[in-house]
């Protein structure tokens, strides 16, 4: 029996049992990381440098790209290190930091996706009020609120989780530090307090989901009334990428946390955790750039400018 004060490190779940598969996973994670860094970096650079992209929609997209970069840089480097060097340890402090930043970026992303849905709703359903409801100051306040709320939310969860006494070993059934797996190590009923926080957080996330669904019902009702086919296409082109990103993020996360116990297995849990924590940050830039002509042109212009300078 041990408690949290005597734990100096945690054991993470290995991505593979054989050395060959570990190296293969390292290469896959490296490829996904480079794709995420390149894609999100291009979006950030294009929006920052393109004057015509200084609009609320692209401002929030820039913030979303920052959260994607932060999210993948929180979980993947340690997993790559463990796969390359055939280890599975993470320090107690490192685990706390990883949990803090993962919860921070995920919570900010949920807030930003909800705000971006509100932006699309106002743009399509209340276009005459767009400048008033989503002026530069209002956008800055909403983005700042998302980041500040995420910070406080993550700080609360991290402090509460790591204040629990841990006496069921130090092996985590996950390839990164995550709240549910740390709670399994607790030997105190105090973990019910953290479960309560998780339940409240789930209710808030569900509220965001309901808001997004309700907003898109209103958006599609308005879009289908647009007489011009070109107008409908333009409206859909700005909404579908956001809807695809929300669907990818929520579907994988919901399946990871709400799948029935009968479906649970170490290999399936590992695949699902990779799907919701690693894949979305790499796919989000591709989803947005494929459907948004303005962003596509800005990215190509930026890349051509770089090549000409070289």
Image (cartoon, rainbow, N blue to C red):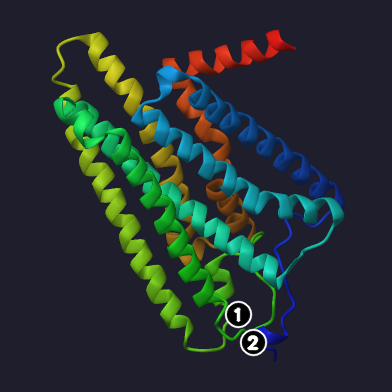
- Left or right position of 270 against 213: right
Residue drawn at x 22%, y 39% is 215
Residue 187 vs residue 129, the one in the foreground: 129
Residue drawn at x 53%, y 70% is 158
Label 1 or label 2, whichever comes before in sequence order: 2
Q: Quadrant of residue 234?
A: top left
In the rendering, at what x and y percent does residue 33 appear?
A: 67, 39
Alpha-carbon span between mark 1 and mark 2: 6 Å
- Please, is residue 269 above or below residue 167 in the view? above
- Residue 220 visible in the shown view: no
Identify residue for label 1. 185
Furthest-bottom residue in this view: 1
- Left or right position of 187 against 207: right
In the rendering, at what x and y percent does residue 106 appear?
A: 48, 52
- Residue 175 visible in the shown view: yes
Residue drawn at x 64%, y 60% is 176
For the residues labelled 1 and 2, say whether their Cβ atoms are less than 8 Å apart: yes
Q: SS at mark 1?
A: loop
- Residue 167's disc is 2
């Amino acid at each position: 029996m041990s408690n949290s004060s005597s734990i100096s490190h945690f054991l993470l779940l290995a991505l593979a049992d054989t050395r060959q598969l570990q190296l293969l996973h390292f290469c896959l994670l490296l490829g996904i990381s480079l794709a995420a860094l390149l894609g999100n970096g291009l979006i950030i650079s294009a929006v920052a440098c393109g004057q015509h992209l200084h609009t609320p929609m692209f401002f929030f997209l820039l913030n979303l790209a920052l959260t994607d970069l932060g999210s993948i840089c929180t979980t993947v480097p340690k997993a790559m290190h463990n796969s390359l060097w055939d280890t599975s340890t993470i320090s107690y402090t490192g685990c706390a930091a990883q949990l803090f930043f993962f919860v921070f970026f995920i919570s900010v992303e949920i807030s930003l996706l909800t705000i971006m849905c509100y932006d699309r709703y106002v743009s399509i359903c209340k276009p005459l009020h767009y400048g008033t409801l989503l002026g530069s100051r209002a956008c800055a306040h909403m983005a700042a609120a998302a980041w500040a709320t995420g910070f406080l939310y993550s700080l609360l969860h991290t402090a509460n989780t790591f204040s629990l006494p841990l006496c069921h070993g130090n092996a985590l059934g996950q390839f990164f530090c995550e709240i549910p797996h740390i709670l399994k190590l607790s030997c105190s009923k105090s973990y019910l307090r953290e479960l309560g926080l998780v339940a409240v957080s789930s209710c808030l996330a569900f509220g965001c989901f309901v808001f997004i669904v309700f907003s898109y019902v209103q958006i599609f009702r308005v879009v289908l009334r647009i007489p011009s086919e070109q107008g409908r296409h333009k409206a859909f082109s700005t909404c579908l990428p956001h809807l695809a990103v929300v669907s990818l993020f929520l579907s994988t996360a919901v399946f990871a946390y709400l799948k029935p116990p009968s479906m649970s297995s170490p290999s399936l849990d590992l695949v699902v955790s990779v799907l919701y924590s690693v894949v979305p940050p790499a796919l989000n830039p591709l989803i947005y750039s494929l459907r948004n002509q303005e962003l596509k042109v800005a990215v190509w212009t930026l890349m051509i400018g770089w090549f000409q300078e070289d």
